[in-house]
């Protein structure tokens, strides 16, 4: 019985020794494989001829695109500077055309003043005529630029065009009608420049009714 036990024990020991030996033999192989794998990862294979050719082509394209980008940036910067200068000039000389059209009117004023100073006679009528001519010339010049007068007299009060400075009781005009224009209003190409200052008619009855409603 003891012989059989010893025999089994010997066989078990042999198996253990064999497994240990196999394990020891496998470890160097695994280490070699790991070292080989790490070396392959650290040192990639050199590029092939086709890959080198493609890299050169891509590098040439990148250089070309970079030069184009530099040119576009320079052109954009020049355009920005030119537009800024044009904007400044437009602001600075925005009224140049209007001034040119007003210069003849200034000449007419100069001539009228010179004529009034050079004469010894009291020529009020001629001076009045000269002023009226200059006024008409100035009015035509402004109309040519798109300026129009607002004719408010006799019109229904319009808060978009008129500025009521007072109300006046009257039976001669309908309630809310402009009966007098104190100062002219103007529009520039249908845009309001200055409202017309007006006096608006109101009927005596409406004033009485308004006071009665306020008292209530």
Image (cartoon, rainbow, N blue to C red):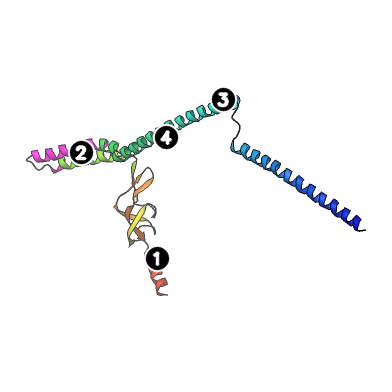
- Return the x and y of residue 157 as percentages of the image width and height: 38, 55
Residue at 43% across, 32% down: 70
- Cα gap from disc 1 to disc 3, whole angstroms: 97 Å
3D distance between C-alphas at marks 4 and 3: 30 Å
Residue at the image position 15 percent from the left and 41 percent from the top: 127
Between marks 3 and 2 in the image, the one whose residue lies nearer the viewer:
3
Do the numbered discs 3 and 2 sit on residues whose CB atoms are within 8 Å? no
Look at discs 4 and 1 and give the one toward the viewer.
4
Closer to the eye: label 4 or 3: 3
Q: Secondary structure at mark 4?
A: helix
Residue located beneath label 4 in the image: 73
Q: Nearer the viewer, mark 2 or mark 4?
A: 4
Disc 4 vs disc 3: Cβ atoms closer than 8 Å? no
Tag 3 or tag 4, which sits nearer the N-term? 3
Find the residue positioned furthest to the right. Answer: 1
Distance from disc 3 to disc 2, alpha carbons, whole Å, reads 78 Å
Query: Which residue is identified by label 3?
Result: 53
Mark in the foreground, 1 or 3: 3
Do the CB atoms of the residues marked 2 and 4 lie less than 8 Å apart? no
Please give the range of residues in magenta. Answer: 101-125
C-alpha distance separating marks 2 and 1: 50 Å
Q: 8 above or below 64?
A: below
Given residues 175 and 22, the one toward you in this image is 22
Q: Left or right: where does residue 207 sit relative to residue 64? A: left
Label for residue 206? 1
Residue 210 lies, with reference to residue 164, above or below; the image says below
**73 sits to left or right of 62:** left
Residue 66, x across and y down, in percent = 46, 32
Residue located 40% across and 72% down the image: 214
């Amino acid at each position: 019985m003891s012989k059989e036990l010893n025999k089994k024990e010997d066989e078990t020991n042999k198996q253990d020794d064999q497994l240990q030996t196999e394990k020891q033999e496998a470890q160097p192989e695994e280490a070699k494989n790991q070292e080989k794998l790490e070396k392959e990862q650290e040192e990639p294979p050199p590029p092939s001829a086709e890959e080198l050719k493609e890299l050169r082509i891509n590098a040439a394209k990148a250089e070309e695109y970079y030069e184009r980008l530099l040119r576009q940036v320079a052109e954009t910067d020049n355009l920005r500077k030119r537009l800024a200068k044009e904007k400044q000039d437009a602001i600075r000389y925005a009224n140049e055309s209007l001034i040119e059209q007003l210069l003849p009117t200034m000449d007419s004023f100069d001539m009228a003043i010179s004529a009034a100073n050079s004469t010894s006679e009291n020529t009020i009528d001629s001076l009045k005529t000269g002023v009226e001519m200059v006024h008409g010339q100035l009015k035509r010049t402004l109309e040519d630029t798109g300026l129009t007068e607002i004719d408010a007299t006799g019109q229904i009060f319009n808060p978009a065009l008129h500025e009521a400075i007072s109300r006046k009781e009257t039976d001669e005009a309908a309630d809310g009608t402009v009966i007098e224009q104190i100062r002219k209003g103007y529009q520039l190409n249908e845009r309001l420049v200055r409202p017309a200052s007006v006096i608006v008619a109101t009927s005596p009855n409406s004033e009485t009714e308004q006071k009665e409603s306020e008292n209530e």
